[in-house]
Amino acid sequence: MDIIDRKILRILQENARTPIKAIAAQVYLSSPAVSARIENLEKLGYISGFHATINRYKLGYHITAFIELSMEPSRKPEFYKYVQQEPHVLECSFVTGDYSMLLKVAFHSTMELDTFIGKLQNWGHTRTQIVFSTPVEDRGVLIPDEDFEV
């Protein structure tokens, strides 16, 4: 990966809908060369997909919460199958500390959240924090100009 690849990644991370022609102008390459680089970055796993950022509040999801769940490690495979099917789970991470799972969820109401927490308590003990505001949304990762070790 060279400086041009990193610049392409920064541009796409900022706006995945940036036209190839516009990217080409910014990195001083032809459109076919940029397309080939993007294809290679996908093949190498640097780009795992292109997504639209949806405003969940416009869709009525006014409650965002983080739920910590402590559970027996032996139940992880079964829990992963369960949680992958839950549409309100935005993210689920296996973490260190007193709790083994950290879930980010979105719901229309606290009543829906309460019902979901009740279901989670079949897996173990929970602790929940409801988000008041998010001053820094997911903004991607820092892509440095210089070489870096992976």
Image (tube, rainbow, N blue to C red):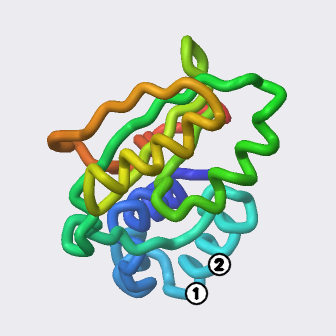
**How far apart are the alpha carbons under marks 1 and 2?**
6 Å
Q: Position of residue 35 (x, y in %)?
A: 58, 81
Relative to 43, say whether 142 is above or below: above
Q: Position of residue 47 (x, y in %)?
A: 60, 62
Q: Position of residue 43 (x, y in %)?
A: 74, 67
Q: Secondary structure at mark 2?
A: helix
Residue 32 versus residue 149: which sits nearer the camera? Answer: 149
Dot 2: within a 10 Å radius of its alpha carbon, few (fewer than 14), some, or many (20 or more) residues?
few
Q: Quadrant of residue 42 in the image? A: bottom right
Residue 43 versus residue 87: which sits nearer the camera? Answer: 87
**Residue that numbered label 1 is attached to:** 32
Task: Please give the name of the residue rendered at 50% of the width and 54% of the height, measured from the top-left corner.
Answer: 89
Task: Please give the name of the residue rendered at 37% of the width and 45% of the height, measured from the top-left corner.
Answer: 114
Task: Please give the name of the residue rendered at 55% of the width and 12% of the height, measured from the top-left corner.
Answer: 98
In the image, 20: left or right of 43?
left
In the image, 92: left or right of 15?
right
**Residue that numbered label 2 is attached to:** 36
**Kind of residue sitting beneath label 2:** Ala
Q: Secondary structure at mark 1?
A: helix
Q: Are marks 1 and 2 in contact (CB under 8 Å)?
A: yes
**Kind of residue sitting beneath label 1:** Pro
**Quadrant placement of the C terminus:** top right
In the image, 30: left or right of 107?
right
Dot 1: within a 10 Å radius of its alpha carbon, few (fewer than 14), some, or many (20 or more) residues?
few
Relative to 40, say whether 114 is above or below: above
